[in-house]
Image: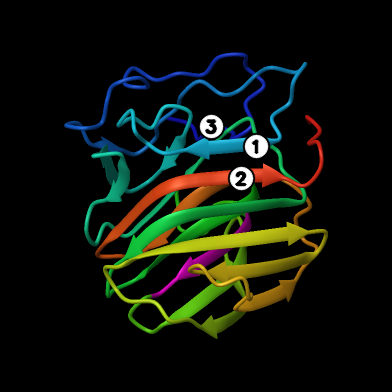
């Protein structure tokens, strides 16, 4: 099956199990659902609490996951997984989520992303993630083939405990927050990617759950 574009020009993209509740069904590989297509009211915000126990509105690249009890959950030690929301194009934004990361691997948020395919770095965009075993906050970007680190910072997180991760992007500056603190734990600058969608990514994690994902544009987004 050919790899689909994240920003499909088709008004409707769907798969046979696009609307199947995932409370008791696991999804593996590609998952194509209905993208947002309204051009009269482009979205300036996005929220997902997974209370309907589905991945409706998300595209899944690789990995083995489920949605149950109102949470996105990764199968243990499943290599890598990236899932994004097609049809969104954020520039300056705030994106955040509650997540639990185990004592192996890392998991976090993707932003300003485009051109997705199956592979740990098979997208173009930024990633901010937590590695609870080593206590760092990892920041970097992928160019579709390779990973490029943009820094790291020590953070007070516990493996297996829920923590809030927030990223504020404005122009070429990115500011990262962990937990309830109003003080950033990390900041970096990069101008490679000006806009794109948001998503969730993990790499080598033995535990990774996500809930209450939200993104808010700092200005009205423009459609491509």
Observer-nearest of 6 and 217: 217
Is 152 on the left-hand or right-hand side of 39? Answer: left
Q: Which residue is mark 1?
A: 45
Up-down relation of residue 220 to residue 178 (above or below): above
Callout 3 secondary element: loop
Percent position (x, y) of residue 48? 47, 37
Rendered residue at 47%/34% (across/down): 58
Secondary structure beneath dot 1 equals strand
Residue 1 sits in quarter:
top left
Left or right, 16 with reference to 179: left
**Magenta stretch prevailing secondary structure:** strand
N-term-proximal mark, 1 vs 3: 3
Q: Which residue is mark 2?
A: 215
What label does residue 100 carry, if any? none
Find out whether residue 26 is within the magenta segment. no
* In the displayed structure image, the side of residue 66 where residue 19 appears, left or right: right
Badge 3 is on which residue?
4
Q: Nearer the viewer, mark 1 or mark 3?
A: 1
Q: If you read the primary sequence from the N terminus, does the residue marked by circle 2 or circle 3 appear first?
A: 3
Q: Are marks 2 and 1 in contact (CB under 8 Å)?
A: yes
Q: Which residues are magenta?
A: 125-131
Q: CA distance from mark 1 to mark 3?
A: 24 Å
Where the C terminus falls, by quadrant? top right
**Image position, residue 5 (x, y; %):** 59, 33
Q: Are marks 1 and 3 in contact (CB under 8 Å)?
A: no
Q: Residues within 10 Å of mark 1 (few under 14, many from 20)?
A: some
Nearest to the eye among marks 2 and 3: give it. Answer: 2
Classify residue 100 by image quadrant: bottom left
Q: Determine contact: label 2, label 3, CB under 8 Å.
A: no
Location of residue 188 in the rendering, given as x and y in whole percent from the top left corner: 71, 74
- Precedes in sequence: disc 2 or disc 1: 1
189 up-or-down from 168: above or below? below
């Amino acid at each position: 099956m050919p790899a689909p574009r994240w920003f499909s020009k088709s008004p409707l993209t769907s798969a046979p199990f696009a609307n199947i509740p995932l409370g008791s069904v696991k999804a593996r590989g590609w998952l194509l659902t209905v993208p947002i297509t309204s051009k009269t009211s482009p979205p300036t915000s996005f929220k997902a609490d997974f209370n309907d126990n589905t991945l409706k509105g998300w595209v899944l690249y690789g990995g083995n996951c489920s949605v149950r009890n109102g949470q996105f959950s990764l199968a243990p030690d499943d290599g890598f997984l990236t899932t994004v929301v097609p049809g969104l194009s954020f520039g300056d934004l705030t994106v955040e989520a509650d997540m639990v990361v185990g004592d192996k691997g890392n998991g976090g948020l993707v932003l300003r992303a485009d051109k997705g395919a199956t592979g740990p770095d098979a997208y173009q965009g930024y990633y901010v993630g937590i590695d609870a075993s080593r206590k760092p906050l990892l920041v970097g970007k992928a160019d579709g083939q390779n990973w490029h680190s943009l820094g790291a910072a020590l953070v007070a997180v516990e493996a297996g405990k829920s923590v809030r991760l927030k990223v504020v992007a404005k122009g070429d500056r990115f500011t990262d927050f962990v937990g309830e603190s109003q003080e950033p734990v990390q900041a970096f600058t990069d101008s490679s990617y000006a806009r794109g969608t948001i998503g969730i990514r993990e790499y080598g994690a033995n535990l990774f759950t996500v809930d209450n994902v939200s993104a808010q544009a700092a200005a009205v987004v423009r459609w491509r």
